[in-house]
């Protein structure tokens, strides 16, 4: 097991799973500027580690996944010209998750608000506890919500639901978030980590090249539905059929054993 700490973000590699944990419990794991800046570096570190198959993003303790951006920094970072610079840092963090080459899971307990909710939305899957709450309260703070951040929201919810969430700024309980499409699954708070780990390990046991091709296809057709790059997607699919893992999958089936995929 290896550990990396950058600011208040702690990353731990545990077998095939790379955990990124926001450690700012006193402020409900709100992201400081330093944390926003650190996230892309940690995601890249996970992508470069061949042993890592799944990235899990979460928050320390049980009260919050993340309450969003640390409002105590707004006076210094989100006024005048500084606001655009801060937005750019936020955007880089969201993009690193949305474009991660490896599967990403948000493990959500408690509050999942604002930029924290956007981080969760930028992950591939979202597993929430039954007491988790979700909100994007930009309208309650008179914050203009960057249109680039609405695209990931439209990838998991209908346009009508996204409008409702942004217009009202209300708090949605886990059951309603599941119904909206915001969550993939709900579990009890006590079972949240185990459920998330089971899903992560189920993914990790499968062929990385197949998962990478599927992830790229879904993302490409969601983002560019009118003109997806089928040439690139076909190349990724073709690479599966010429891989060692494809041969291993066939051998394992015939030998009635679990395959051991190596991502090549």
Image (tube, grey):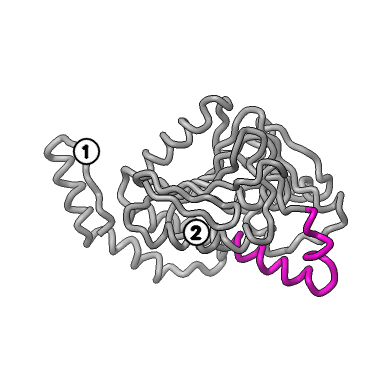
Magenta: main secondary structure equals helix
Horizontal side of 56 relative to 67 (left or right) equals left
Q: Is residue 255 magenta?
A: no
Q: Is residue 75 magenta?
A: yes
The residue drawn where x is 72% and y is 71% is: 85
Give the class, few, some or many, for how many residues have Cα within 10 Å of label 1's Cα (few <14, many ≥20).
Answer: few
Residues shaded magenta: 71-94
Q: CA distance from mark 2 to mark 1?
A: 31 Å
Q: Earlier in the sequence, mark 2 or mark 1?
A: 2
Task: Name the residue rendered at 43%, 55% in the picture.
Answer: 102
Return the residue at label 2: 42
Residue ID at (38%, 58%): 213
Is 45 situated above or below 22?
A: below
Q: Name the mark on residue 258.
A: 1
Image marks 2 and 1: residues in contact by CB distance under 8 Å: no
Q: In this view of the protein, which residue sits in the foreground, 180 or 82?
A: 82
């Amino acid at each position: 097991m290896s550990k990396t700490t950058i600011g208040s973000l702690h990353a731990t590699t545990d077998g095939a799973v790379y955990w990124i944990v926001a450690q700012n419990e006193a402020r409900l794991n709100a992201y400081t500027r330093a944390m926003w800046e650190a996230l892309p570096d940690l995601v890249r570190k996970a992508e470069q580690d061949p042993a890592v198959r799944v990235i899990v993003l979460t928050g320390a303790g049980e009260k919050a996944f993340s309450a969003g951006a640390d409002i105590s920094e707004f006076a210094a970072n989100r006024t005048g010209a500084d606001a655009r610079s801060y937005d750019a840092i936020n955007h880089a963090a969201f993009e690193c998750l949305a474009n991660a080459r490896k599967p990403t899971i948000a493990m959500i307990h408690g509050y999942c608000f604002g930029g924290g909710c956007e981080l969760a939305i930028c992950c591939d899957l979202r597993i929430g506890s039954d007491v988790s709450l979700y909100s994007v309260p930009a309208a309650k703070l008179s914050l203009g919500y960057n249109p680039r951040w609405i695209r990931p929201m439209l990838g998991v919810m209908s346009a009508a639901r996204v409008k409702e969430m942004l217009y009202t700024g209300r708090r949605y309980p886990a059951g309603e978030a599941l119904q909206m499409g915001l969550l993939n699954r709900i579990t009890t708070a006590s079972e949240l980590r185990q459920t998330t780990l089971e899903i992560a390990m189920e993914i990790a046991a499968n062929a990385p090249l197949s998962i990478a091709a599927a992830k790229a296809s879904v993302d490409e057709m969601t983002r560019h539905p009118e003109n997806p790059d089928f040439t690139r997607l076909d190349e990724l699919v073709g690479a599966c059929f010429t891989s060692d893992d494809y041969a291993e999958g066939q051998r394992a089936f015939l030998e009635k054993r679990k395959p051991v995929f190596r991502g090549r």
